[in-house]
Image (cartoon, rainbow, N blue to C red):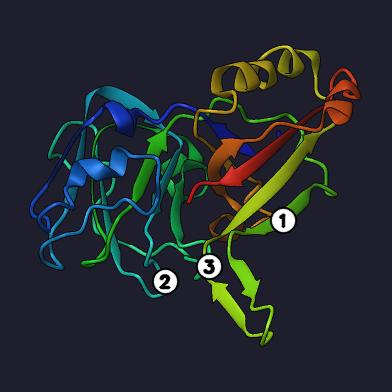
Amino acid sequence: MAKDIWCVDNPVDRAAITATGAVAGLTPDRIADPRRGKAWRPGAPTDTLKITFANAVQVDVILVAGPAFKPDTELTLELSSTPGAGDLRTGPWLPKIDRMARQALWIADVDAPGGTGLTVREIVLSASGLDIGRVWAGPALWRPHFTHVYGAQQFVEDLSQKQVALRSGTVFTDTAARLRRQEIKYEAMPVFEWDGPARDLSLTAGLAKQVLFVPDHEYYPPERHAILGYQETLNPIQALGFRRFEQTFVLRESG
């Protein structure tokens, strides 16, 4: 079994979200906004964020993203089977963080006892006073039988603009976000996947629903290559050229 993970449902968006403190106007409910840059800002470095689910949820992947996350960001993470218990995990959390991707990942296959997802009622976390812009915590929709093809493509889309003054040639630049894009292709899928979760992913998420893709952690460091974003349409010629039991997904990172 390959170790790619596709997540479509984020129960955090339906949970009760509170915090021990917040800067005025930057309240904890902002983490349910799909934009990574619309963040909760703690009022003090020791403030924590609490996410309480109405019913226990299966958690295979947790992603925490922040606009200022950097490799030395200090985090804490507590997971509870009942609110306040802290029985599944508690204490410092030291995930690898890439300075460009600015995201921290907890993957049950790696971090949970026994390497399986946990049934969670409450998550409590902090990032040592830094903004937290988006939290994803939930089950995997699809764990493909085979990993995506080695030749899948990656891009960086630079939204900056450059203008040149006609008379002097002076260059004026507007520095903007550089967003990652991935083209993820599967070949020779078993029929139960091609006509099951791969189909469900396209029909459930479509273009408008945010999804989380975590590539095989044994080959692709997830802190660099996991991507939280949206599907993009494909060139019509490419779409018509799909072979049965093959599927290509193109994801653009959420800003």
Query: What SS does tag 3 mark?
Result: loop
- Mark 2 belongs to which amino acid? Lys
- Mark 1 belongs to which amino acid? Phe
Rendered image quadrant of residue 113: top left
**Mark 2 burial class by Cα count in 10 Å: few <14, some 14-19, many 20+:** some
For residue 144, side relative to residue 174 (left or right): right
Residues at circles 2 and 1 in contact by the CB criterion of under 8 Å: no
Query: What SS does tag 2 mark?
Result: loop
- Mark 3 belongs to which amino acid? Met
> Residue 155 has which mark?
1
Nearer-the-camera pick, 60 or 127: 127
Residue 46, given in percent of the width and then of the height, sits at 13, 64
In primary-sequence order, the first of circles 1 and 3 is 3
For residue 201, side relative to residue 60 (left or right): right
For residue 33, side relative to residue 151 (left or right): left
- In which quadrant of the rendered image does the N terminus lie? top right
User: Label 3: which residue?
Assistant: 100
For residue 122, side relative to residue 152 (left or right): left
Residue under the image location 30 percent in, 38 percent down = 32
User: Label 2: which residue?
Assistant: 70
Residues at circles 2 and 3 in contact by the CB criterion of under 8 Å: no
Determine whether 70 is above or below 3 in the image: below
Rendered image quadrant of residue 203: top right
In primary-sequence order, the first of circles 2 and 3 is 2
Q: CA distance from mark 2 to mark 1?
A: 22 Å
Residue 75, given in percent of the width and then of the height, sits at 29, 62
